[in-house]
Image (cartoon, rainbow, N blue to C red):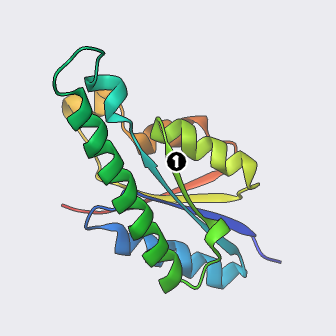
Amino acid sequence: MAMYSKILIALDFHGDNAEIIEKGAQLARENGAEIFLVHVNEPLAVAYAADGMSWSDQVVSLETSIRKEAQKKMAETGARLSLPADNCITREGKPSSEIHDVAKEKNIDLIVMGTHGQSGLQLLLGSTANSVLHGSTCDVLTVRVGD
């Protein structure tokens, strides 16, 4: 009996995504599970663009460019894994909240994501992986990446 039937792989599109994808794909193969990918863009405009500010249009333009690049990378990653477009999800918002929402919407059994093993002040402030772990209704596997 398979332990997991739906696996969500959360990506940030930094250089270490290959390790996270491989671990998620391996678990999917071992369990005969369906793979979903998610990437969440944190809105810049909310934090930095204010009405009347001379640079707000530039922030919105940058945000649009970041969104398009993320969608392109998501499509490429999904194609490499032979995933249907519906399984490749990009969202806007707070990463941990959006990952939780996708997990609930898709009835995910396991979330696979990376962690850089933060310490000190970064640990006290929290990380996306920590927030996902503590608010998740399913299993979460963090893959240690980077240094």
Dot 1 falls on a residue whose secondary structure is strand
**Residue found 50% across the figure and 39% down from its top:** 96
The image shows residue 123 at horizontal and vertical percentages of: 29, 33
The image shows residue 33 at horizontal and vertical percentages of: 71, 76
Say how many tags the image has.
1
Residue that lies at the very extreme toward the top in this rendered image: 52
**Residue found 34% across the figure and 61% down from its top:** 69
Q: Is residue 127 left or right of residue 86?
A: left
Out of 140 and 75, give the one closest to the viewer.
75
Q: Is residue 125 left or right of residue 109?
A: left
For label 1, count other residues whose C-alpha is less than 10 Å away and answer few (under 14), some (14-19) or many (20+). Answer: some
**Residue found 36% across the figure and 68% down from its top:** 17
Out of 135 and 72, give the one closest to the viewer.
72
Asked if one can make out residue 120 in the rendered structure from this viewpoint, the answer is yes
Amino acid marked by disc 1: Arg
The image shows residue 59 at horizontal and vertical percentages of: 24, 35
Asked if one can make out residue 4 in the rendered structure from this viewpoint, the answer is no
The image shows residue 127 at horizontal and vertical percentages of: 36, 38
Q: Is residue 58 above or below residue 16?
A: above
Residue 97 is drawn in which quadrant? top right
**Residue found 39% across the figure and 69% down from its top:** 73
Q: Quadrant of the N terminus?
A: bottom right
Residue underneath mark 1 = 91
Out of 57 and 41, give the one closest to the viewer.
57
